[in-house]
Image: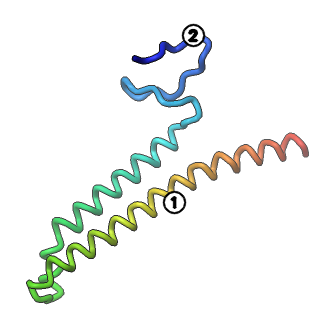
């Protein structure tokens, strides 16, 4: 059962029926959507076009399966790394803004 939100509690960004936490900004959500789109697009590319790519490289057909599995594994590592990298950039931008505000107030 959900707890009712008190009227004195701050609400975050609202996207349709979903209400996010107050500290989450639009750029955080945009980073998430970009990472998700990149992951889906790269998975589709590897899985749909692998036969065409392997044929163009004139690889033997008995190696297609093993190579496709290896490419999919590498692709997963790349997607996880990219999502983590862009997530860190999103958080880092917030920290830089806070630090610059503090330095501006001191100077």
Image x and y of residue 31, in percent: 46, 49
- Give the answer, above or below, for where 18 lies relative to 9: below
Quadrant hosting residue 56: bottom left
Q: What's the residue at 51%, 43% (across, down)? A: 28
Residue at position x 26%, y 62% in the image: 43
Q: Identify the image quadrant of the N terminus.
A: top left
Left or right of residue 46, residue 27 in this image: right
Q: Is residue 93 left or right of residue 33?
A: right
Question: In the image, 86: left or right of 46?
Answer: right
Q: Earlier in the sequence, mark 2 or mark 1?
A: 2
Left or right position of 16 against 44: right
* Secondary structure of the residue carrying numbered label 2: loop
Residue labelled with disc 2? 7
Quarter residue 45 falls in: bottom left
Residue at horizontal 63%, vertical 50%?
A: 93
Residue plotted at (65% across, 45% down): 94
Say which element carries label 1: helix
Outermost residue to the front: 1
> Residue 7, position in %: x, y?
57, 10
In the rendered image, residue 34, in percent from the top left (x then y), is placed at: 40, 51
- Disc 2: CA contacts within 10 A as few (<14), some (14-19) or many (>=20): few
Return the residue nearer the eye: 50 or 104. 50
**x then y, percent, for residue 3:** 47, 16
**Mark sitting on residue 100:** none
Q: Residues within 10 Å of mark 1 (few under 14, many from 20)?
A: few
The residue at the far right in this view is: 107
Q: Which residue is mark 1?
A: 85
Report, in whole angstroms, how far the alpha carbon at label 2 lies from the one at label 1. 37 Å
The colour scheme applied to this rendered structure is rainbow
């Amino acid at each position: 059962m959900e707890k009712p939100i008190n009227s004195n509690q701050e609400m975050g960004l609202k996207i349709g029926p979903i209400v996010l936490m107050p500290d989450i900004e639009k750029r955080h959500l945009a980073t998430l959507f970009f990472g998700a789109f990149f992951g889906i697009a790269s998975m589709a590319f590897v899985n749909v076009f692998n036969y065409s790519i392997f044929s163009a490289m004139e690889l033997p057909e008995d190696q297609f399966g093993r190579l496709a599995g290896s490419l999919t594994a590498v692709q997963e590592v790349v997607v996880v790394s990219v999502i983590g990298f862009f997530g860190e950039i999103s958080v880092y931008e917030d920290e830089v803004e806070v630090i610059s505000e503090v330095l501006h107030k001191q100077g």
